[in-house]
Amino acid sequence: MAAFDLSTWTRLPWEFWALLFFIFGSMVGSFLNVCIYRLPRDLSVVHPPSHCPHCSYQIPFYLNIPILTWLMLGGKCANCGARISPQYLIVETLTGLMFLGTWARFGDLDNLGSSLLVTLVFCILMAGLLVATWVDFEHYIIPDSITLGGIVAGFFLSFAVPQVHFTDGRIEALKDSLIGIVFGWGLLYAVLRLGKMAFGQKRIRLPEGTRLHFSETGITQSGSDEPETPYQDLFFRESDKLRMKARTVELPDRCFFETEVVLQPTLLKIGNEEMDPSTVPSMEVVTEEVIQPQEAMGFGDVKFMGAIGAFLGWKGVLFCITVSSVLGSIVGILLILIRRREWSSRIPFGPYIAAAAVLFLFGGRAWAENWFRTGQLLP
Ligand SMILES: [Zn+2]
């Protein structure tokens, strides 16, 4: 059968594959939209099928064409006319372009079979990077299904398509992937610990006898004209916390004296007692100092770097850590210069890691290979 003969397919022009990857990418993008919304909310990505959030109308599958459906309906629900976010169009188009770009980078008509497989593996990586970036921007987390799932997927795909690691040997590719996972996880974990030591914690000194009032929505200082500081400006991640050495702590039903208070989004610790902060309607704390541990990144970034190592090996990890730190510093300084943010406010680190991984695929890898081989920074 001609259809099963690879030489039939190699006669198709490069543009045919480019278009195919774009269409395939936009379809995957449709699914990524679902992941971006549902993964951080712990909802199933397969059930229920995508529907209008206002009227629950479900576009029949034969009308649900990526990009085109959104454009034809003018960004509105076909049934109730509610606005559908342009994010859907953007993610579908972006994924299509990324898949097309991956084919442009790794596709090779003279070596069609293996280059198609390599392109597919890197498309999977790209899809993961996109979801991680989007979710990290919105929620300051990277879901485990992306990070831990990426580690497992990267490891097995390295075995299935060893060419991803520049080799035909499956064992060699597995080794590179495994070292990449350990190296990525370990190195970023070290950076995380060192960062904690370097940035330490922010200490906010208060006049003696200051009384802080913790409401259900935020913190106010009694006797001060400052507006309430909402919790969402203080807590970004589950692990973020405030620590206070309290003279007194008053809850509606009891008091504590000379004890330590630790407040996290889902945990309130007073001395050795732990409780759920959502069950405490209000709290008054008399203290001289509030300590806010500073975290440049979270544990999600550590797992994320492990996943990148699984796909790109240890050289990829080294490249991504270096480049993401540089990118992060440049953007951070630029934002401060144009006064868009304070030193203390934070941007998630995951998107920089993702950007570095993309740069590695599109040129960084060749540059790194040359650097490791010749020791020269410039080719
Ligand atoms: Zn609707």
Image: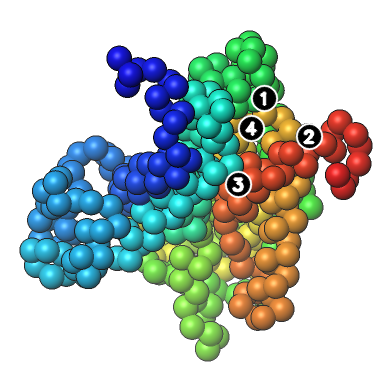
Amino acid type, mark 4: Leu
Cα separation between marks 3 and 4: 11 Å
Q: Secondary structure at mark 4?
A: helix
**Where is 308 relative to 174, above or below?**
below
Q: Which of pointers 3 and 2 lies earlier in the amino acid sequence? A: 3
Amino acid type, mark 2: Glu
Q: Which of pointers 1 and 3 lies earlier in the amino acid sequence? A: 1
Q: Evaluate if marks 2 and 1 touch, with contact meaning CB atoms under 8 Å apart.
A: yes
**Which image quarter: residue 282?**
bottom left
Per the image, the residue denoted by label 2 is 369
Per the image, the residue denoted by label 3 is 358
- Is 204 positioned to the left or the right of 149 in the image? right
Q: Residue at x 15, y 51 (%)?
A: 63
Q: Which of pointers 3 and 4 lies earlier in the amino acid sequence? A: 4
Q: Secondary structure at mark 2?
A: helix
Per the image, the residue denoted by label 4 is 312
Cα separation between marks 4 and 2: 12 Å
Which percent across, then down, holds residue 13? 45, 39
**Where is 119 relative to 272, above or below?**
above
Q: Evaluate if marks 1 and 3 touch, with contact meaning CB atoms under 8 Å apart.
A: no
Pick the front one: 249 or 113: 113
Q: Residue at x 39, y 69 (%)?
A: 217
* Front of the two marks 4 and 2: 2
